[in-house]
Image (cartoon, coloured by chain):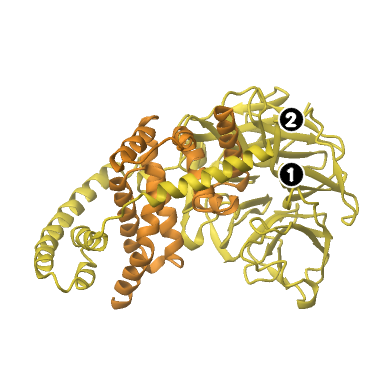
Chain colours: A orange, B yellow
Amino acid sequence: MDEVRAGIELLFREEYASMHRLAYTMLVSDREAEEVVQDAFMAIVARWDQLSNPGGYLRVAVVNGARKRLRSRAPREAAELRLSSERDRGQADADAELLDIVDSLPERQRTVVILKYYAGLNATEIGAMLGCPSATVRSLLRRALDDMRAVLA
Amino acid sequence: VRSETADIERELTEQLRGRAESATPPDDAWRRFVVRQVNEVPALPRTIADTVTDDRSLRRWGTRVRWIAVGAVAAAAVIAVVVATVARDSEPALLSTDERSPTTTAPDAAADSPEPFVPEQVAVPDQVGLVPILPTGERARFISVAVGAGPGGFVEVLGNGQVSILRRSFDGVHWVPTLTLDNDERLASGDWTASVAANNSGYVVTGPFVAQYSPDGVNWQQLFPVDGTVTATDTEFIVIDASDGDLTLRRSGDGVNWSEVRAAAHSLPGSVVGELRSRIAGLATDGSTTIVAIANQGSNRSGQLWQTTDGRVWAEVFTPPPDPASSDMIDVTHGPAGWVAVSLGQDSFLWTSSDANTWTRTDLGADLRPRRFPYITRIQATDAAYLAVGSVLGNPTGDIGAWYSVDGVHWTLITADQPGEQQANDVTPFGASFYLRGEQNTGDHPVDAGWWLRPG
């Protein structure tokens, strides 16, 4: 049991901040990001003995948790959340036109864009997380970039 | 367009990193996590809470909560037994939570009955072309990644990255789940997706971790660890496995008893298999020669085709040219006019060969104008024809796409006038027709999708 405790605590201390940032990038809400990451760690605790790669499982659980919340949101909610969050921080949003477009993309496109351009994953790795072929990931990315080009044109 | 795209990609990376840096994780996240465990996980809190050694009140409070939790769990168990008793006849046996529910679970009385599967009773549309099977409209938490047709009907694998579900259908419309696998037993994980092969002996399914066999598509038996793919002739199953960093060829006449031949150490460069991002993407045989398509996606090296006749000695026979930086091999098949392979760089290309050694790029046949991009995910062949399936991005009447050819050289693009975004992820021959499975995206949510293709 000591080993389990030590393993979970080590994983938590090593991964919590980066997982929070990943969830925040998707959700633009510190509160929701914290809930998602905590949920993911709870899932890890429940099946610690069965996991050969807890870090990989954690990331999938965080992404899936964030996706679930995104799906339940109204379409413009993410963009409004971002604006309000940045206002609270006193940040300028003049350069955030691309993020506006990202936030208005359908959930799957938004997720693959963030996993590709923030998390730096390739199409195969994203496919592995979302459970779809890499061709799906590539087509989602291409559609998203086409949309961005069209909006920015 | 490519330079614009590169600018957007660069800017996106910068802005997303900027957003991430503005996140403020709570300082006491670990403490909150411990408290939550004390509340929610009766089995672990003592050890976890012990790590917060300087907070006795937390531990005292945790003890009280544990007693409350024990009472709550006991009450919940009683309620669960009552509910389970009531719901026993209507719940899918293998799927206990909402997250695990597959999408198309209309009751399939035929699948549960002892009646044998009768292929002639499957309602294949008379209409020539690509005919959508109406999606259920339910959200696809799981995506169909592989399908096969055999003596027990249609079998497909659904995946979501964490869990895989095998299910069976008599009519290609209504499905019944038969086996759920997760963690290190799952069959689908992105590109490491399952493959289903079937003949009169039953079905063999492979994925990135294990192989499964079923005589009827309902009762499954785990065979052996595998990271590879499977194909079938009328009399034999062939599995190629790269799970231990080398190639192993396994053969079986009945799906239960298998022979095994390992590649001779000198026949394969060590860099071909066993790399983090290399994998067996496709597999085909003409009865004597076996060809595997090896993908190296994510690395800067292109994929390759390798061939063997005995499983011991392998030879590289083809590497696709860069497109623009590298190209991957996606799949390979053998049909009436020889071998056909699929590569994917920026777009998909088809390659043909009559002798497995010389490969020629073929014209995809459609008037693919700029901004229409072919993505081929699988290719299959019957004795009479080939069918490659995937999607055509930018197609004005819908994305679903299938390329049909009888000679492997001249290809006809077949699309369906269907709104939304679609993609076929796998295809299986069924008589003279083909049965396609995949996904359709409407708004935020992908939904289950399927198509029949009857050649003209």
Badge 1, how many Cα within 10 Å: few under 14, some, many 20+? Answer: many
User: Residue under circle 1?
Assistant: B380
Q: Percent x, y for residue B291?
A: 79, 58
Q: Say which residue appears at 36% left-offset and 59% top-offset.
A: A17
The part of the image, by quadrant, that contains residue B25 is: bottom left
Q: Percent x, y for residue B195?
A: 63, 52
The part of the image, by quadrant, that contains residue B241 is: bottom right
Tell which subunit mark 1 falls on.
B
- Lateral position of residue A152 relative to residue B270, left or right: left
Is residue A84 visible in this depiction of the protein? Answer: yes
At mark 1, the secondary structure is strand
Number of numbered tags placed on the structure image: 2
Tell which subunit mark 2 falls on.
B
Residue placed most toward the observer, B400 or B175: B400
Do tags 1 and 2 sit on the same chain? yes
- Lateral position of residue B223 relative to residue B258, left or right: left
> Who comes first in sequence, dot 1 or dot 2?
2
Residue placed most toward the observer, B358 or B309: B358
Residue placed most toward the observer, B415 or A110: A110
User: Residue under circle 2?
Assistant: B370
- Lateral position of residue B417 relative to residue B110, left or right: right
* Circle 2: residue type: Pro
Q: Nearer the viewer, mark 1 or mark 2?
A: 2
Q: Is residue A141 above or below residue A75?
A: below
At mark 2, the secondary structure is loop
Badge 2, how many Cα within 10 Å: few under 14, some, many 20+? Answer: few
Q: Percent x, y for residue B70?
A: 15, 60
